[in-house]
Amino acid sequence: MDAAALWQRYQDWLYYHEGLEFYLDVSRMRFDNTFVEGMKPKFEQAFKEMEALEGGAIANPDENRMVGHYWLRTPDLAPNPQLKQEILNTLEKIEDFTQKVHSGAILTDSGSKFTDVLSIGIGGSALGPQFVADALAPVFPPLAIHFIDNTDPAGIDSVLTRTKDRLSSTLVLVISKSGGTPETRNGMIEVKKAYEAQNLEFGRHAVAITGKDSKLDQLAKSESWLATFPMYDWIGGRTSELSAVGLLPAALQGINIQEMLAGAKEMDIATRIPKIRENPAALLALSWYFSGNGKGEKDMVVLPYKDSLLLFSRYLQQLVMESLGKEKDLDGKTVYQGIAVYGNKGTTDQHAYVQQLREGVSNFFATFIEVLEDRQGTSPEVEPGVTSGDYLAGLLQGTRQALYENQRDSITVTIPQVNPRIVGALIALYERAVGLYGFLVNINAYHQPGVEAGKKAAAAILDLQQRVIQVLQDENAPISLLVLAQKAEASDKIEAIYQILRHLHTNQRTVVLEGNLGQPSSLLVSTI
Amino acid sequence: MDAAALWQRYQDWLYYHEGLEFYLDVSRMRFDNTFVEGMKPKFEQAFKEMEALEGGAIANPDENRMVGHYWLRTPDLAPNPQLKQEILNTLEKIEDFTQKVHSGAILTDSGSKFTDVLSIGIGGSALGPQFVADALAPVFPPLAIHFIDNTDPAGIDSVLTRTKDRLSSTLVLVISKSGGTPETRNGMIEVKKAYEAQNLEFGRHAVAITGKDSKLDQLAKSESWLATFPMYDWIGGRTSELSAVGLLPAALQGINIQEMLAGAKEMDIATRIPKIRENPAALLALSWYFSGNGKGEKDMVVLPYKDSLLLFSRYLQQLVMESLGKEKDLDGKTVYQGIAVYGNKGTTDQHAYVQQLREGVSNFFATFIEVLEDRQGTSPEVEPGVTSGDYLAGLLQGTRQALYENQRDSITVTIPQVNPRIVGALIALYERAVGLYGFLVNINAYHQPGVEAGKKAAAAILDLQQRVIQVLQDENAPISLLVLAQKAEASDKIEAIYQILRHLHTNQRTVVLEGNLGQPSSLLVSTI
C-alpha cells in the first residue's frame, strides 16, 4: 500500500471519542472490506447477546448466573430496583468508610490514624487493585498499599517484615468472593498470627470483601471486624475492579473512584453502539478475530509506553485469557479457544523482546498504548528542542512503523493521560471487547472451569501428603518409595509422593530421606 | 502412558546436580527416543561451536566480536592473560568500592553515608539488576535501590519524587555500554537537573558503568565522577548480569556476589558436558526444539512458584527473545526464528491465565520453577498438618499434572532455595541453553539488529519533528496537514506528522491545532 492509500486507510478507520479524548487506530491490522462485511452478521448477533446480558439474561449458563459488571457504573441499568439499590449502597458505604479512615473517625485500637493497607487476595482480587495502585496512586498516598497475593511463605514473610513497624496502624483487606480461596485464607491466617505476636487485635484492623454468608463473611461477623463489603454473585473476579474489590483499596489510596466509574460509564455508552466502525470495543474484537482467525492463532502483545501502565498487560492477561481460554464452546463442541497475552512497557521492551517482534517468529499482533501527556508540568530539553517525552513518542512511532513494514500487525490506543477517568474507560473498553469476542467465537466468557479443576488437583495432593505421613508414622523402619506408595494405596502416584517427600524433607517436617535424592529408587524414607 | 511407564520415564530423564541441589525434569515433554537420537548430530555440532566460543572464537560474526560472558565466572578461561586480569581487577574494584560505601570510607559531599542507589539503565542494563534485586536483596538492604529504566517523563518524576528527600545520600549508577543509549542519557540529564535543583554536585554522587572511551566514560572523567566500571565489548547487554552491570548494584544491596559467580561457575561446568542427558542446558534446548519444532511454534510460559522470582520470566523474555528472535540464519537464509516467552508467578497465575493454559489454545509449553524451601524458619499450620508452603507445592504439582493430562507439555526446574549461588546458577543455565539452541537453529544469538533499526526509526521521527516545527515557525497563518507535509518535504509522512503534532499540542509545546482532532483532514496547524 502506498503512502497516500495508507494515510487514507488511517483516516477511514480512526476512531475518536471526543469526551474521553480517546483514539483507537486499527489501520495497521491488514483486514480488507470483504473480511469486515463477512463479520457483520456475527457482530449483529453479538450485539444482541450483549444487550440481553446487560438486561439481566443468564449469560454464564453453567453457573446459572447473571453477568452484571456493567451495572456497577450505571446502576439504572440493573435489572431490578433491589440490585440498583445494593450497588448504590455499597458505593456510599465505601466512600463513607474511606472518609472515616482518612479523617480519623475510624482509628486504630491505640488511637492513631491508619497509615497502611495490606490487601490479601489473589487473581481477580489482586490484579485489578495492583494495576490501579500502580497507575493512579499518588507517590505518597494517604494510605500506602501492600499486597499478599499468593500462598508463598517467603513472600508473606517479606511483606510482613516490611510492614512490621506499622502493623498496628495497618488496615487489612481480606478479599475473597467465595471466602474459601485457600491462598487468601492462608495469607489471612499468617497475617493474623503476626498481629497476635504483637498483641494486636486482628479484628480491629480487618475488613472483609466477600460474598454474603460466605465463610469469610461469617468469620468477620463472629470476630467483629471493622467492616464488610459485598461481592455479588453476578460479578466475576476478573471484572470486579469497579466493584468494592477495586474501589475500596483505590479510595483508601486517595484515588477518585467516582471518576473511574464515570470513565467506565462513558466508555460503556460508546461500546454499546451496534455498529463496528463506531464502537471501539467492536473494533478491537474485529481486529483480534482477524489476526488470530477467530482461533487465537496469534498472541496479543501489549505495549504501553508509560511506566505507570506496566501492569495493564498483566491485568489484560487475566481478563482476556481467563475469559476466552476455553475448551468447549457453548454448544459443547471442543474448540480450545483463547488468545495469549503478554507485554510490559515501552520503550523498555524495545531493548528486550521487541527484537523478536520485529524480526523473529511472526506469531503475534501488537497493541501500542500511547499516552499524549508526558508529565505534569514542563519538560527540560535533552537536546535542542527535544524532550524525554519526544523520545518516548518517537520510539513508539518508529517501532509501530517498523512492525508494519515487516508485515506485523498492530493496534494503537491513544489516551490523553493516565487518570482515574481514563483508567475506568480502559477497563470498560476491554471488558466489552472480551465480551463481544466471546460471543463471536461462541464461548462462555464468564466461567473458569480450569481454575476449579486446579484447586481439586491440589487438594488431592494435600490429601496424599496426609496419607503418606500417616503411613510413615505407623512404620518402625525406613521404607522404599515403592513400599510407601503401596501402603498409602497410591502405587500409581509414586512420583507425586517423591515430590511431596522432597518438599517435606527440605523444610524439616519430620521426613528423613536417605540415599541419592536424584535417584528416587535408591531412597529410604522414615520419620524423625 | 500408564502410571508405571510414566514413573520410569520420570526417573530415566531426571537430572540432578548434587552440588547445587538442582533438579531438572523434562519427562513431561513428550519426545521419544527417535527424536533424541535424531538430534544428536546437531548437538555434537553445537557442543563444538560452544567450545570454540568459550575459547575466544568470533561468535558474533556481523559485529566481529568475541562472546565472553562465561569468562566472568571462570577468568582462567579467558583467551589471554590481559582479559583475565581485567576481569579480576574489575571484580576487586567492585568489592573495594562497595566496602568503602558501606563502611563510610566514601561519603556524600555533606559527609553522611549513602542510603540509596538510583540505577539508570534500560534493557540488559536494567532487567538483570531488577530481577536480582527482587530475588535476593534483603527487605532492608544497606542501600535501597530504585530504577529509572525508560524515557518516560512521568516515570522519572515518580522516582524522583519518591527519592527527593534522600537525593543527597543517593548514589546514581549510569549504565550504558555504548554510553549513547538515548533513554539512559535522557534519564541521566533529568536526574542531574534534580541534583542541581537541590544545589548538589551530581558528579559527587555519580558512577558510570560503560565501555572504555565511550561518551559516558568521557563525561564521567570530565566531571570527576566517583567511579567508573568497565563494560567489555565481548559482553552483550542481555548476558551482562554477572559483569559490573549486575554485580555492582547487587553488592551495594548487600548481596553476596562471590556466591553468584560461584553458582554460575558450577553450572557452567555442568553445562559444558557434551552429552545431552548429562547436561541440563542441553536438556532445555532439546525440549525447546522438540516443542516448537525448531521454529518457535510454541510459546515458553515461565511459572516460578515463589514471589521473589516474579521477574525471572521477564529476565528470560529478554534473554531468550532478543537472542533467538532473528530474521536471518548464519547462512543469510530468511528463517524468522525465536521463541516467545511470558509468565509471572504461581500460584497467582493459576487464578489468571492458567485457565487458558489448561483448557484453551494449545500454543505453549510451561516451565515450572519449584523452590523446595518454603521460608527461613518454621511455618504455622493453616490446617492440621498443613502449611501455606504445602499449598504452594500442591498447587504446582496439581497444575503440572493437569497440563499433562490435557496434553500440554511442561519442564520442571527444582531448586533448594532462592539464594545468590542458585540465582547465579539459573542465569548460567539459561545463558547456556540459549547459546546451544542458537547453534541448533543456526542463528547468531549475540546481536540485535532490530534494536538498532528501532533506534534509527525513532531518530527519523525526531528529525521530522524538528523540520515540522521549523516550517510552522516560518509560517504566518494556520495551514493544513497536507500543506505542512509538503513544506516539510514529507508528503509521504502525513500520518507521522499528525501524531507528532497531537503529542506536541497536548504538552503545550507551541503547536496549536484547530478543528476536529479525530478528523486529521479538518485540522489547521500553527505555532503560538
Image (cartoon, coloured by chain):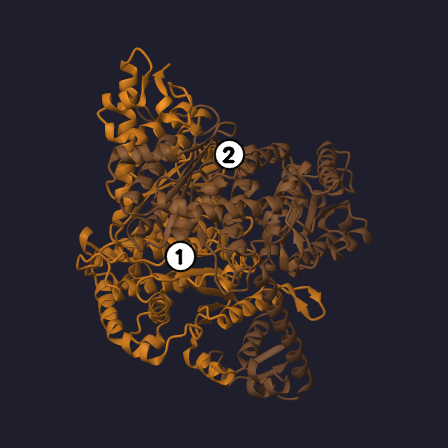
Chain colours: A brown, B orange
Image location of residue B59, percent across then percent down:
21, 59
Which quarter of the rendered picture does the C terminus of chain B lie within?
top left
**Is residue A171 shown above or below B310?**
above
Image location of residue B252, percent across then percent down:
45, 48
Image location of residue B264, percent across then percent down:
38, 63
Residue holding disc 2: A418
**Is residue B512 shown above or below A229?**
above
Residue holding disc 1: A297
Marked residue nearer the N-terminal end (1 or 2):
1
CA gap, disc 1 and disc 2: 31 Å
- At 65% from the left and 74% from the top, the residue drawn is A463
Q: Given the image, on which type of amino acid does mark 1 rest?
A: Glu
Residue A215 vs residue A293, the one in the foreground = A293
Decide if residue A268 is on the left or right side of residue B526: right
SS type, badge 2: loop
Protein chain holding label 2: A
- Quadrant of res B491: top left
- At 48% from the left and 65% from the top, the residue drawn is B368
Q: Are marks 1 and 2 on the same chain?
A: yes
- Residue A6: mark in rendering: none
Residue B292, visible in the rendered structure: yes
Q: Given the image, on which type of amino acid does mark 2 rest?
A: Val
Residue A432 vs residue A80, the one in the foreground = A80
- At 22% from the left and 66% from the top, the residue drawn is B49
Decide if residue A157 is on the left or right side of residue B193: right
